[in-house]
Image (cartoon, rainbow, N blue to C red):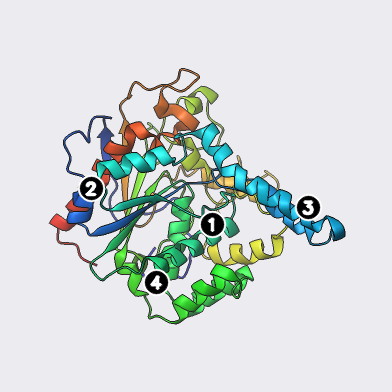
Amino acid sequence: MPAKNQFRHQSYPTAPSVRPTFHQLRVTDGEDVDFSQLHSQFGVREVVLVHGTFMGDDPFGTSAVLRTIARSAGLLEGPLVTLADILQEKMKSLVDGLAQDVGNYTAEYRDAFLQLVGGDPMVRLLQPTWTGQNHHLARADLAVRLLCQLDDMQLMLDETVLFWGHSHAGNAFAILSNLLANDRSSVANFFTAAGQEDAGRWGRARQILESGPSPFPWAKSVLFAAFGTPVRYGWDTGGYQDLLHVLHHRQNDNGDEFLAQPMFPAQSLNDMLTAKYGDWVQAFGIAGTDVPPPIAMQAYRAVAAVLEAGLIEPKHGLDTRFIVPQQVRDTCARWKTGTRCHGDGRNLLVTYEPSGRTTPLASPIEEALLGHGVATTLDWLPAHLTLVLKALNERRVRGIVR
């Protein structure tokens, strides 16, 4: 999307502003790379690792529901809130133990990243983490958290921060880009829609933006690297210095080389399990696939109206016209487009050569989570960081300056 995007949604299929590029990665690609240039050449002071959906501390909203029930539970309010707190405190460690580094950023991943860059920049996991719930409000709250963390960093003029995120974390980055662009009326609408503009970090974020110009100065200090992010919210090009999309992609024979194999009609289960055409989750998680929070439907709908502004209703053929309800009908029509690439930033379409690592089910790690899990694995971190550094260097060589 252009500068002054004002939270407008991307279309299906997209028309990338920069031609996507193809990359064949080997797990050994980072063996001779000087990773310290992340700081020395690009001024990155901090790298923040942000996990995607279902990898947070309340992925299914259980703790949030318990707190809502507690407010009208009389004498049981205290015990229910305590239970909610315990569940939320324990959930992230449980998720980490189950997922490990497949579709999830771990402490070991952070430590390996920090070792690669020689301790500079600082690399950290997002703390406090976000819920990992699959809906607009959760991703909007993550964007607000990141804005407040930028405030905490107090970056100098020559310093940058690299937000390195997986899956829908990238869509929170998209929201953040619109916040940092700081269009007055659309930002005010965003906070008002959520109904939390005076509460905690939301009130703080609103005050931060109201006190600064448009775009906000931090926009020049932000680099985004998004891995496996489904095409959802529009990006504001005035809200960041650089934007990279790393997408697991294998070409099909059915049209545009940049498109994914369509998710509708339904594909072969074996093709999905083996990631025959790349990351199926990234192609799946487009508009219409949210799981709305039952305890905050009014706020959810209000935020959806802001974040889905400009989303065009798809055209229907005989194969989708009679599907009900409408949300499923529209989602199926959008799946048919096979949208893989984002409209803004640079789309790096990656094919992975097998690393030799396998899952507990003896399948290649590159096929894990339908092709979605490879992006966060320790094995591929050096190659991914090499790819990102190469892309940043290419931009510098061309003399592209925001």
Q: Residue furthest top?
A: 362
Disc ID at residue 139? 1
The answer to whether residue 78 is above or below residue 209 is above
Density class for disc 4 (Cα within 10 Å; few <14, some 14-19, many ≥20) is many
Horizontal side of 333 relative to 147 (left or right) equals: right
Q: Earlier in the sequence, mark 3 or mark 4?
A: 3
Q: Tell which tag, 4 or 2, sits nearer the viewer.
A: 2
Element at label 4: helix
Q: Nearer the viewer, residue 196 or 261?
A: 196
Q: Position of residue 43 (x, y in %)?
A: 23, 59
Report how far apart the C-alphas of labels 1 and 3 lie in the structure: 29 Å
Horizontal side of 87 relative to 218 (left or right) equals: right
Disc ID at residue 181? 4
Label 3 belongs to which residue? 79
Quadrant into which the C terminus falls: bottom left
Identity, as a three-letter code, of the amino acid under mark 2? Leu
Report how far apart the C-alphas of labels 3 and 2 lie in the structure: 50 Å
Label 2 belongs to which residue? 389
Quadrant into which the N terminus falls: bottom left
Element at label 1: helix
Q: Earlier in the sequence, mark 3 or mark 2?
A: 3
Element at label 2: helix
Report how far apart the C-alphas of labels 4 and 2 lie in the structure: 25 Å
Q: Tell which tag, 1 or 3, sits nearer the viewer.
A: 3
The answer to whether residue 84 is above or below residue 214 is above
